[in-house]
Image (spheres, rainbow, N blue to C red):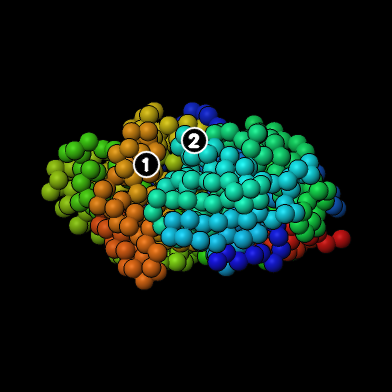
Amino acid sequence: MTEPMSHRSPRPAPRTAAPTPLPAAGRPVSRRTLLAAGGAGLGLGALTGCAGPTGASGPGTLTLALNRSLVSLDNKLNQFDAAVTVQRAVRQALTEIGTDVKPHLVLAESFEPTADTRWTVRLRPEACYSDGSPVTAQDVAAAVAAYAATDASFVMSFFPEVPTVNVVDDRTLTLDTERPLPTLDALMSNLLITPAAANAPEELQDGLGSGPYRMTFHDRGTGTYTLERNPNYWGEPGLVETVDVRFQPEESSRIIAIRSGEVDVIDSISPDAAQQLRGLPGIELLETPSLRFNQIFYNFRKPPGHPLADPRGRQALSMAIDGETLVNEVLAGTAVQAEGVVTSNQAGYVKTGEYVYDPGAARKMLAALNAQDLEITIIWESGEFPGDTFVMEALVEMFGDIGVRARLQEFQPGGDIMSWRQGRAGDWDLLGNGIPGPTGQAIVMLQGMYAGTAEKEATRDTYQGYVVPEVTDLIAAAASEADPVLRQELTAKAQQAVWDTWPCAWQFNPKAILAHRRRVRGIDLSPANNYRLTAVDLRS
């Protein structure tokens, strides 16, 4: 049974630009110098004498500066963690994942399993959009259809199958599946509902929402939004009248902005930024272990015979990475090196192995594969995780230590990295990536990454080309197992099977770190790196 929220309002999308190539291992810095530089390499060391405000937030306005561009208040393609705070203040789902990492009711008054392959949903009679029109079962049916029909839908990758929606009446519907889907109440927390007539298989740029705020201005190009309190909100209203949202890609600019009072909240900050801000008057830090994984993931579209098409080649590169040094020196202890294929705070997690640093063994393994002269390309989008560029440069040095020449290719936010990831635009070997755990359940995270099929690969809807049929079968069996004990046994087997394929050169679980000015109160940062905007208030 899905629990109701104590407050009835709950709580992520790129543009196109050319990639920015970075130099390869010829960059004039030794690995020791690079790592010893620590956070100073992120360019924040000179912020102790910041400039004054360039436009402080008004007394009744909350200003948020995001590290990723919010190109839509819809989430069919992407769902960056911190953006959920803003998106779900305007658009809502049937359920939401609370700070306890469990599903809670939002638009749904009840969400109950009524048969092995059926959930019955009853909508709240008071739920309505900002124009006063009611939220209907037809709107839910249209949302499921629109998400399912969206090409490369990020959200739908977590669904083992698309449920069939049967509308009983305006307020009642059933969600039917071919196999049992015991996590469906959690999965539906990711589908944002909008009026049926205005929905479409694409990320919507405007339109009505049922949330406590309504959008009154937006500029998709700059990632700028203004939200005003929704006068027709059906639940508990927000405490702040106006919310301004902006995109500031440079962390140094965001640090200056919050120190000067120009912005109130900055999200997803790096370890060095946290050190810069900790203890400063007027600023507080919040941090919590997150549900997010950051990865150096392999391209599984390599042809047979390529060293990285062989698990031994993938393991060899992994053994070149000094993960403990990266965690302690580069990430300043704000992350934990992975010992599994999902984060350890996911329900159903099991430890499957360890990343071992052994460059001597790495060289021998590559020599056995006749891959001593390997050259690789590492791609990532700027801002994918805090300190990402510094981590990538350290990897170049580490791979160089075993004779592997690495080239870095960075994509700016809104760039063409999606086409590269799908194998449509260019070849690459490793991807710096982050993936959320949107429901807090291991089986859902496994589904989103590792349940690839030949059919999905034909449309490039797999996770970096990962298609291993025996792994997919294990995940499918676990996802549809109604008995919790058997489901856990299958989930554990699936995790070990994934680990044995060496999908990542390295993975780590970061803390979610947020900074806010002391005039802001009520932020309850969840492990999903978001919070309910209605609970936030401003001190006079």
Q: In what element is the residue under mark 2?
A: helix
Residue indicated by mark 2: 149
- Placement of the C terminus among the 4 image quadrants: bottom right
**Quarter residue 466 falls in:** top left
* 443 displayed left or right of 173: left
Q: Quadrant of the N terminus?
A: bottom right
Q: Nearer the viewer, residue 390 or 515?
A: 515
Q: Quadrant of residue 423?
A: top left
Is residue 331 something that shows in the picture? no
Q: Secondary structure at mark 1?
A: loop
Quick one: label 1 or label 2, which is nearer the N terminus? Answer: 2
Crowding around mark 1 (Cα neighbors within 10 Å: few <14, some 14 to 19, many 20+) is many
**Point 53% across, 39% down: residue:** 145
Neighbours of disc 2 within 10 Å: few (<14), some (14-19), many (20+): some
- Which residue shows up at 39% across the image and 38% down it? 461
Disc 2 marks which amino acid? Ala
- Quick one: 506 or 245, which is closer to the camera? 245
Residue 323 drawn at (x, y percent): 37, 59
Q: What residue is at 71 percent from the left and 60 percent from the top?
A: 8
Comparing marks 1 and 2, which lies closer to the viewer?
2
Residue receiving disc 1: 462
Q: Is residue 452 visible?
A: yes
Q: CA distance from mark 1 to mark 2?
A: 16 Å
Label 1 is placed on what type of residue? Thr
Q: Are marks 1 and 2 in contact (CB under 8 Å)?
A: no
Viewed as shown, does residue 85 lie left or right of 347?
right
Residue 27 % position (x, y): 39, 40
